[in-house]
Image (tube, grey):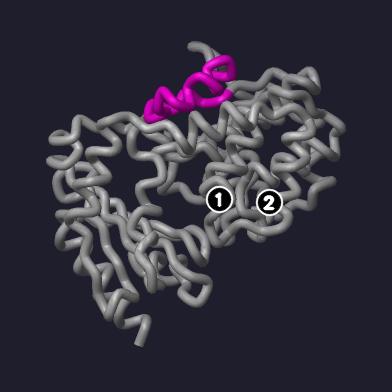
Amino acid sequence: MTTMTLNECIRFLKEHDRYLLVTHIRPDGDTLGSAAALCHILRSMGKTAYVYDNPETTPSYMEYTKQYLVPDGFSASCVVGVDLASERLYPKGFDPDTVFDLCIDHHGTNTGYARKLYCISSKASCGEVILLIAKELGIMDPQLASLLYIAVSTDCGCFVYGNTTAETHRAAAELIEAGADYKRLNRALFRTFTFSRLMLEGLIYSGMKSYADGKVTAATVTLAMMEHSGATEDDCDDLASLAGRVGGCIVSVTVRELEECVSKISLRSAESFDCAALCALHGGGGHRMASGCTMHLPPEEARETIVRDILEALK
């Protein structure tokens, strides 16, 4: 793996063609918005580029990405991971033996699976990294600005998460000035919920656990809760932020049951606690204040296991 500068990344993008851009498993607004934005940039350069048709893309994001999806039979010459930090995060249905030519990312825990890596771990979102590329190339229009706004805003919780920086706000301002449809996007992505989502939140709050005098809070989302509320995958954006809303909380845990004996763990914290280091103990990773891992345990056992580790680390 070779790390790249911005100019080297630009040169790479100019020299190659027939791109396939790949997002991560359970795709969020950052990976989808960033991949679609990069695809838009490459097409503006006269390149042939498509985004892998991630089967877990929810309807709320499909509206913005569908025009970039790869058609059947396309043969790529250059495969690029976008906001894709590890081989463990390859999307469902993707060939695990695929060789990645490039990865563009913002995760300091990137495993270096691609031949070349352009990564800025200080950025709150991969969208901010793609924005640098767009600016260097002199490519910007309202559609691109909206895609990048989706990426930037969702990965910082509409600018309220601890990863938000002055640069994040400046990036958002630039995108708004460039024509991003931010009013519609803010309402659609952050202010509008289905009845099922609100029902699910009620179940999550009613079962929340508190440890160490409120320093640690833990929420569990089971398949039974999903069924009872009628919630779908489209209702599960940003569930990991709910447990951290409790006053006095330093570390919050969200355990989501994906299937029998498979639980996804999401940690969120104040800057004083390193979520990435703790998740790395269980084969996961991410950022200092927001990381995740997967445990092959029922949700209750997974919750107690990760909470035990957190309490030990807090000592």
Q: Quadrant of the C terminus?
A: bottom left
| Position of 229 relative to 3 (above/below) | above
| Residue 267 can be seen in this image | yes
Residue 22 x/y as whole percent? 54, 33
Q: Residue at x 12, y 41 (%)?
A: 224
Instruction: Please state which amino acid type lies under the numbered disc 2.
Output: Thr
Q: Nearer the viewer, residue 276 or 179?
A: 179
Say whether disc 1 or disc 2 marks the residue closer to the N-terminus: 1
Q: How many marks?
A: 2
Label 2 CA crowd tier, 10 Å (few <14, some 14–19, many 20+): many
Instruction: Report the magenta residues as a range.
Output: 51-69
Residue with the mark numbered 2: 168
Question: Residue 35 lies in magenta, yes or no?
Answer: no
Q: Which mark is residue 156?
A: 1
Q: Residue at x 39, y 38 (%)?
A: 26
Side (left or right) of 120 relative to 160:
right
| Position of 229 relative to 141 (above/below) | below
Asked which secondary structure carries label 2, the reply is: helix
Q: Residue at x 40, y 53 (%)?
A: 241
Quarter of the image for residue 91 reads: top left
Instruction: Please state which amino acid type lies under the numbered disc 1.
Output: Cys
